[in-house]
């Protein structure tokens, strides 16, 4: 920045120089006047001295003799001459002083002019610094005089100014690049500082809003941005509270259109109020999304187990405080979901879950809470007070809604559901106990054949304890040799000749006596004991059948858990080798449900068994979804028609049609069919008329101990000699 030169007459240094010159001139004039006066005095005194000497008679003259005071006259003339000499000396002194003053004055004038130029340059540098230009250099730095020291001081000020200017520039850049809007209010509540972010956030009409009153800003929020009056009033109150406390605080503002701001307010020591404003709308939305994802099932968008447990705990606590706010918990499992998922694939299984969730929502009130706990498990919190009637009706509606067919990617599928019901505080006082009670009721619903709902009662806990005791006893029985095998004959329906036996596990407990397979087999499957029990049955059956007639086969049931054991194929091979039973005489019965678990692996295991020479039979045909699908993928040796269809032959047209269709399918595919559960001759005739060639049931023989098998075979040889 260019600064115009400073006129000398207007500068302090110029004025000092003029005053100094004037003083020198005055001193010269004074001394000159004194010298002139002294010269005049000296001239007069010299003239008086000459006259006085002229008046003294010369020696030897008459006048000398007559003079009365000749010595005094001579002394006066001498004194006048001395005074004249002193006056002359004074004149000369003042003439010298005058000359010296004149020379000194000229020197002062010359020095003053040089000093004036230096001070003028220094002054110009100071004015440049004052104008904000810190780039220039300060002259005369380092010189050993007052001007040099003044220049050094000015250089320090310049460096400080440069640092301050740099800091202010950095601060300005920082303010303008902050994600928050920054605004400072003065003690009289005027805007004294803000960044552009603040103005933009609030859609203020001008870029520089300094000088605006806080009330003007609030009015803009209310009338231009549409902030609710309650939000404005709350903001004003909080600002007043923080200002009164002289401290700091945070203000959260929830605004229309899902806009959210967080204001951080701090009162500064000088009374100014610094406010930072952050738009946290996206953060709030993201946090809400994260919370939703963390607490909801991604497939059905229902609350997940974590959120369900929170809401259940709150509901149980409310019910404990007020019985009128009692709740009912419904646990719901989809029946046969695993089979559907494995048969039609995971996309179909996912769609089934979504459709089931929609149907369940449609049967409930808006106040009820539906959650997916995982897999095919759902739960409902019914806020229905102490009267359980409405909750029981809801359970019935759920079962009915889920019983209807589902359209899964073009396939009509029926699954059904089992529901367990328990209430709080009637049945339990804590969320954990309530879950246990409802789970007991759910287990009872499955035990009753599924596709139904069961309400908890106290006897269910006893049943659960009984189940636990049976499981413990089974583990001991496997080692104690309490299990045995019974064999039920399988016959050719035309000749009534025994063609094989099915091995059936039997358990005689030392205290309980005979325990029904309908009791211990489901417990074995649920506890995993079925793997150990199944291996024992396989090895025992092979060993028992080895000495029988070479034409007689032995059929052994294999659970899905056994098929998925890594050593299953090795176990079959070892059982055959250890017993000496030819592989062609062993027939393994595979249920449809077993075929649905990891179907590709199942096919690989079946092919390996076929390669060994073992026969394979599909058990309980027609009760699941995969029968026809697997008959296409794998050629079974035999199809076993489930006894539920045989039992209703002659009484239900549907059963007659199914038996005929299955038998006909077997003939067309070249697969033998066998009907189980034949108890009457009419049933045997109907099965034979349907083209089913083999049968099994009480009509022919009950299961017999292994020791009676040779007797049955001997009696058959006598009745039908070769």
Image: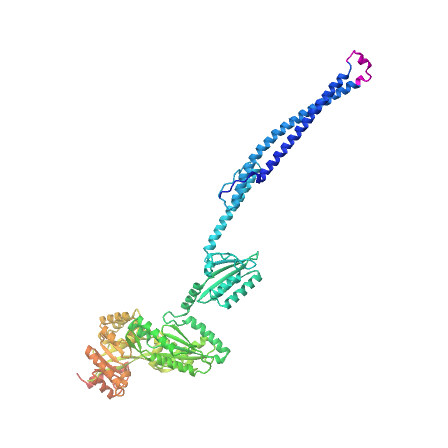
Out of 667 and 273, give the one closest to the viewer. 273
Q: Is residue 459 visible?
A: no
With 194 as the anchor, is 109 left or right in this view? Answer: right
Out of 440 and 184, give the one closest to the viewer. 184
Name the residue at 48% across, 55% down: 175
Asked whether 65 falls inside the magenta stretch, the response is: yes
Q: Is residue 612 above or below residue 248?
A: below
Q: Position of residue 393 (x, y in %)?
A: 40, 82
Colouring scheme applied when the structure was drawn? rainbow
With 143 as the anchor, is 401 left or right in this view? Answer: left
The quarter of the rendered structure image containing the C terminus is bottom left
Q: Position of residue 43 (x, y in %)?
A: 70, 22
Residue range of the region highlighted in magenta in the rendering: 58-71
Out of 114 and 274, give the one closest to the viewer. 114
With 553 as the anchor, is 149 left or right in this view? Answer: right
Name the residue at 25% across, 88% down: 650
Out of 10 and 124, give the one closest to the viewer. 10
Q: Is residue 431 above or below residue 262?
A: below
Residue 647: name its quadrant. bottom left
Name the residue at 43% across, 83% down: 389
Q: How many marks?
A: 0
What is the residue that sits farthest to the top in this orientation?
A: 60
Q: Is residue 39 visible?
A: yes
Q: Is residue 149 above or below residue 283?
A: above
What is the residue that sits farthest to the left in this orientation?
A: 722
Q: Is residue 611 above or below residue 31?
A: below
Asked whether 229 falls inside the magenta stretch, the response is: no
Q: Position of residue 474 (x, y in %)?
A: 36, 77
């Amino acid at each position: 920045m260019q600064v115009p030169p400073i006129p000398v007459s207007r500068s302090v240094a110029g004025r000092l120089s003029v005053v100094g010159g004037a003083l020198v001139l005055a001193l010269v004039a004074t001394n000159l006047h004194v010298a002139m006066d002294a010269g005049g005095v000296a001239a007069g005194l010299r003239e008086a001295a000459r006259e006085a000497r002229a008046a003294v008679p010369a020696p030897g003259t008459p006048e000398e003799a007559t003079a009365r005071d000749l010595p005094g006259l001579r002394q006066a003339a001498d004194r006048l001459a001395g005074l004249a000499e002193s006056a002359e000396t004074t004149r000369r002194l003042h003439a010298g002083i005058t000359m010296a003053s004149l020379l000194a004055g000229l020197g002062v004038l010359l020095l003053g002019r040089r000093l004036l130029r230096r001070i003028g340059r220094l002054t110009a540098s100071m004015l440049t610094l004052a104008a904000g230009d810190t780039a220039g250099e300060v002259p005369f730095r380092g010189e050993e005089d007052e001007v040099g020291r003044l220049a050094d001081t000015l250089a320090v000020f310049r460096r400080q100014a440069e640092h301050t200017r740099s800091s202010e520039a950095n601060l300005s850049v920082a303010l303008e690049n902050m994600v928050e809007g920054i605004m400072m209010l003065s003690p009289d509540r005027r805007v004294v500082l803000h960044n552009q972010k603040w103005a933009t956030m609030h859609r203020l009409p001008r870029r520089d809003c300094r000088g605006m009153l806080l009330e003007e800003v609030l009015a803009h929020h209310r009338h231009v941005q549409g902030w609710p009056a309650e939000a404005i009033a709350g903001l004003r109150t909080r600002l007043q509270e923080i200002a009164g406390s002289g401290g700091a605080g945070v203000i959260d503002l929830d605004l229309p259109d899902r806009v959210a701001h967080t204001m951080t307010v701090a009162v500064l020591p000088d009374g100014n109020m610094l406010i930072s404003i952050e738009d946290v709308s996206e953060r709030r939305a993201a946090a809400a999304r994260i919370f939703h994802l963390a607490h909801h099932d991604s497939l059905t968008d229902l609350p997940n187990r974590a959120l369900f447990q929170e809401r259940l705990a709150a509901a149980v606590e409310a019910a404990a405080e007020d019985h009128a706010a009692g709740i009912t918990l419904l646990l719901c499992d989809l029946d046969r979901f695993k089979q559907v998922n494995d048969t039609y694939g995971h996309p179909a299984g996912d769609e089934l879950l979504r459709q089931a969730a929609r149907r369940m929502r449609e049967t409930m009130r808006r106040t009820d809470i539906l959650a997916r706990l995982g897999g095919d498990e759902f739960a409902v919190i019914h806020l229905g007070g102490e009267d359980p009637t409405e909750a029981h009706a809801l359970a019935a509606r759920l079962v009915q809604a889920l019983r209807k067919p589902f359209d899964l990617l073009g396939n009509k599928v029926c699954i059904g559901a089992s529901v367990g019901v328990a209430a709080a505080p009637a049945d339990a006082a804590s969320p954990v106990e309530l879950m246990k009670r409802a789970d007991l009721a759910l287990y009872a619903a499955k035990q009753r054949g599924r596709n139904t709902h069961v309400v908890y009662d106290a006897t269910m806990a006893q049943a659960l304890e009984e189940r636990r005791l049976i499981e413990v006893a089974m583990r001991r029985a496997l080692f104690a040799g309490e299990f045995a095998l019974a064999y039920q004959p399988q016959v050719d329906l035309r000749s009534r000749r025994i063609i094989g036996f099915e091995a059936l596990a039997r358990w005689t407990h030392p205290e309980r006596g005979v325990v029904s397979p309908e009791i211990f087999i489901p417990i074995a499957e649920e506890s995993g004991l079925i793997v150990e029990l199944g291996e024992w049955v396989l090895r025992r059956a092979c060993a028992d059948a080895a000495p029988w007639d070479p034409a007689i086969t032995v059929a052994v049931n294999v659970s899905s858990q056994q098929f998925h054991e890594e050593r299953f194929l090795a176990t079959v091979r070892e059982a055959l080798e250890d017993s000496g039973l030819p592989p062609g005489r062993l027939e393994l019965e595979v249920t449809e449900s077993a075929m649905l678990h990891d179907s590709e692996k199942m096919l690989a295991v079946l092919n390996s068994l076929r390669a060994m020479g073992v026969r394979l039979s599909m058990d309980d045909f027609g009760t699941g979804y995969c029968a026809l699908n697997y008959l296409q993928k794998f050629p079974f040796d035999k199809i076993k028609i489930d006894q539920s269809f045989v039992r209703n032959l002659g009484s239900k047209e549907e059963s007659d049609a199914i038996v005929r269709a299955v038998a006909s399918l077997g003939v067309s595919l070249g697969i033998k069919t066998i009907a189980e559960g034949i108890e009457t001759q009419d049933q045997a005739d109907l099965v034979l008329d349907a083209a089913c060639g083999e049968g099994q049931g009480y009509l022919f023989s009950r299961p017999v101990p292994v020791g009676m098998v040779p007797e049955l075979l001997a009696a058959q040889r006598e009745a039908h000699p070769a």
